[in-house]
Amino acid sequence: SNFRTDQYGGSAENRFRFISECIAETRRLVGPEKIIGIRISAEEYEPDGLGVQAWLKIREQFNAETELDFVDVIAGSMMGPGGSFHVVPPMQIEHAYVAPKSAAIKAVMDKTVMVAGRINQPQQAEEVLAAGQAHMVGMTRAMIADPDMPNKAKAGNLDSIRACIGCNQACIGHFHMGVPISCIQNPVSGRELKLGTRANAEAKRKVLIAGGGPGGMRAAVEAANRGHNVILCEAATQLGGQTLLGQLLPNRSEFGGITTNLKYELDQAGVEIRLNTPVNRALVEAEQPDAIIIATGATPYTPNVEIADDVHCADAWQILRGEINPGANVVVADWRCDWVGLGVAEKLALEGCNVHLCINGETLGQNLQLYQRLYWAGAIYKLGVKVTHYARLFGADGDTVYFHNNVSGEPIICEGVDTLVMAQGHTQEITLANELEGMDLEIHMVGDCLSPRSAEEAIYEGLVAGRNV
């Protein structure tokens, strides 16, 4: 990418001159006591980008920079989409995948070498160091998820660490939206001044939580840690809500870490958990809580379109649970352009189906964080999934599914379809909220039962509700 012909281009010496001058000027400005490091990409993942072999060739120039103390090794670049998602690699990328590359650089460089990239637990960092792949490990997102992680690791309390799941939603995702970074698991991060320190309750109350998804679990933890007597009821056989579905997608099992981390916090907070216990008005009247937090979630939404009785139709939840045989040819009608439609399309393609992903937006994964979207776009392309944009579901009969282009209004017809998979968003589950109308009871609603969105909003609202009861 350097096409200069002056003293900063051409020869290896000239091309390195800019780095050398930056190091020298930085040292002049900060003085002799500060540590100076430089971040390099061991593999830029672009056709004309640098890789490990290129860095090995210029190692002597780095070694000669006496004012440079360390080299920080990552992967990726901002030169194009193929390299950019490695800058903050999503959960589909394997842990510590840059470490072998940093090891090659460390072997020939006289500087301290740090490595970063999908190292989210101290155990992983220790493995990298023990293998001699680096002298130091950088763990940015891990520290946003749990700022107390180093202290917990030092004390040997590894189970108490709230591990980053690499979702990218509220950290780099917020950054790209121009708002303060946070973490979907740790909503206090980035909101320390707004939310302040959790205060103990003035009086102990009995708090009933209806729903054991992320929002309900977070609410239970907060309320119990304030000193309340908390009962968490979940209608299903296990806690987790929609995270149990999200972790079933290809290379997305780490999403279930939300539930794992919250289960630990529930246990530590002393929350009473009742599984297989749907909450209704009779149960509320029997328990007589001082307050109830409703976190009953949502169910798949079915739009008001004409679907004939002879159409083999399934929702995304049924596909993820393995309840439906999709056949050979599948159309996925993706309204929300998020992880549901994309993930189901990838899952079915990996299972051997011919998949046609029809999205209602401008691009697949439009509502996902950029790096998640880019990674998934590459995966979908490799699998041969056909993608049609601006496609809004119109109806279906027999083996034909009808869409219309939501920009031009022109018809889009998909024939020879074995199964139509609906990824059309979700609708609130508010049966309990309706049942409790008229009761003299403090009621809070959080998450999808309030408005179907994502785990980020559910956990944040759960935290706020747990602090307000």
Image: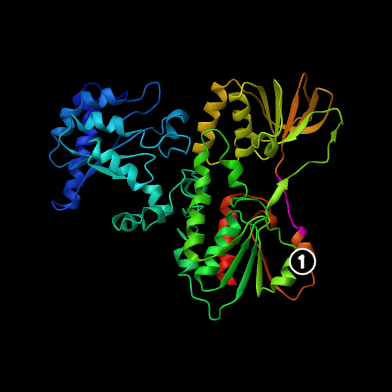
Q: Quadrant of residue 368?
A: top right
Tally of numbered tags = 1
Based on the picture, tell me whether residue 430 belongs to the magenta stretch.
yes
Based on the picture, tell me whether residue 357 belongs to the magenta stretch.
no
What's the residue at 51%, 72% (across, down)?
226
Image coordinates for residue 264, horizontal then vertical, percent: 48, 56
Q: Is residue 306 left or right of residue 26?
A: right
Image coordinates for residue 346, horizontal then vertical, percent: 59, 29
- Up the image or down, 144 lies above or below 313; here it is below
Q: Which residue is mark 1?
A: 281
Mark yes or no: residue 335 visible: no
Q: Quadrant of residue 87?
A: top left
Image coordinates for residue 325, horizontal then vertical, percent: 71, 27
- Magenta segment boundaries in residue numbering: 426-431
What's the coloring here? Answer: rainbow
What's the residue at 72%, 69% (across, down)?
284
- Up the image or down, 171 lies above or below 279; here it is above
- Up the image or down, 412 lies above or below 26; here it is above
Q: Residues within 10 Å of mark 1 (few under 14, many from 20)?
A: some
Front-lying residue, 155 or 272 = 272
Quarter of the figure that contains the C terminus: bottom right
Q: Please, which residue is most extreme toward the bottom here?
A: 203
Front-lying residue, 308 or 247 = 247
Quarter of the figure that contains the N terminus: top left
For numbered disc 1, what is the local secondary structure? helix
What's the residue at 32%, 23% (across, down)?
3
- Up the image or down, 28 lies above or below 100; here it is below
Image coordinates for residue 355, horizontal then vertical, percent: 66, 24
Q: What amino acid type is highlighted by mark number 1?
A: Arg
Q: Is residue 442 left or right of residue 190?
A: right
